[in-house]
Image (spheres, grey):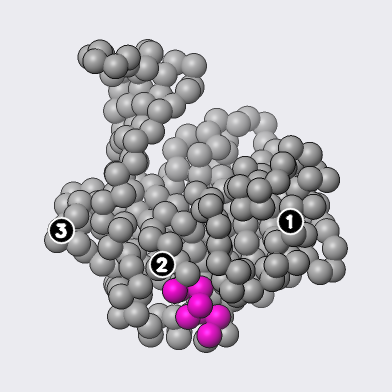
Amino acid sequence: MKKILVIGSLNMDIVIKVENMPLTGETILGRDIQYIPGGKGANQSYSAGCLKGDVTMLGCVGQDEFGEAILNNLDQAGVTINQMKRSTDYPTGTAVIYVNEAGDNSIVVVPGANGQCNSAYLKENDSLFIESDYVLLQMEIPAEAVFYAIRRAKQLGKTVILNPAPAPEAIPEDILNYIDYITPNEIELARLTNTSCDKLDDIIYASFSLVERGVQNVLVTLGERGALLVNDNGTEHYKAVKTDKIVDTTAAGDCFNGAFVTALAEGKSEKEAVLFANTAASISISRAGAQRSIPSREETDRLLEVKFNYS
């Protein structure tokens, strides 16, 4: 098993269920409240940990109860958190999510301590870059830190995976040359390439445009349609693993990314890694919540064996 370094965000999601969304100036009563560890970086680390990856995370939380709860959750999943930053100036990142009876949501995110996951902090932990084999990032921490991490990882010869979520307006051209795998969904791909991605042909065209600009592999997550891998060798469409019920797709993409990097770190081929990631994600959407929906390694291997006759 090769070593995985995940760099990214950690949030506490405060989910409040309401009958209807409040109007301006209106006070309403909520029906339920839940505190759920989240943030894309934490979710992807948690996924890799649950799936038995050798994963370390770098990120920043506040010195508060939310931060403590998030770190404990990661630790229980087997994620190494020894070098996590604890800010004395900012609280742990928080997302307040209102969900009405129709399932519509309204979200307010306060990044808080995530803004302190900067390049200076990453430079202090250069030994983790050196020790790692795969570096996985998202875009919920300062962009300068993400781009620094990509440059440093590639300078050291590491495999770089970028999940461009939320999609930035642009990624510097030199950074694109350092990305081994970029893993957008259709919406993120459309934003990155400034093209329509409504049809599969459009998605393929947009993906090749990133390959032409230097990205080695574009792996587009397509929800119920599976995933599409595009590179200089052509395209490969991997169908989704069907599930009997869809309960919550919130962390499906994060589960996919954590599973994909774990499979690569184990020496699986790209095809095997995508099938493994699709399988793990299919289990996650059959359950409510973000991190608590992530399957175990045993569950994922069992379903893989049933669907594809191997684990």
Whether label 1 touches label 3, CB < 8 Å: no
Question: Is 120 covered by the magenta stretch?
Answer: no
Please identify the quadrant where the C terminus is shown: bottom right
Residue of label 2? 144
Q: Residues within 10 Å of mark 2 (few under 14, many from 20)?
A: few
Which residue sits at x=46%, y=56%? 139
Please identify the quadrant where the N terminus is shown: bottom right
Answer with mark 2 or mark 1, whichever residue precedes in sequence: 2
Question: Measured from the top left, where is residue 261 in percent x and y?
Answer: 58, 65
Question: Is 152 covered by the magenta stretch?
Answer: yes
Q: Residues within 10 Å of mark 3 (few under 14, many from 20)?
A: few
Query: Mark 2 to mark 3: distance in Å?
Result: 20 Å
Q: Nearer the viewer, residue 5 or 186?
A: 186
Which residue sits at x=49%, y=16%? 102
Q: Is residue 8 above or below residue 103?
A: below
Which residue sits at x=47%, y=69%? 147
Whether label 2 touches label 1, CB < 8 Å: no
Judged left or right of residue 200, residue 31 is left
Which three-letter amino acid code belongs to the residue tagged 2? Glu
Viewer can see residue 162 = yes
Which three-letter amino acid code belongs to the residue tagged 3? Asp
Residue 207: image tag: 1
The magenta segment: 148-155
Whether label 2 touches label 3, CB < 8 Å: no
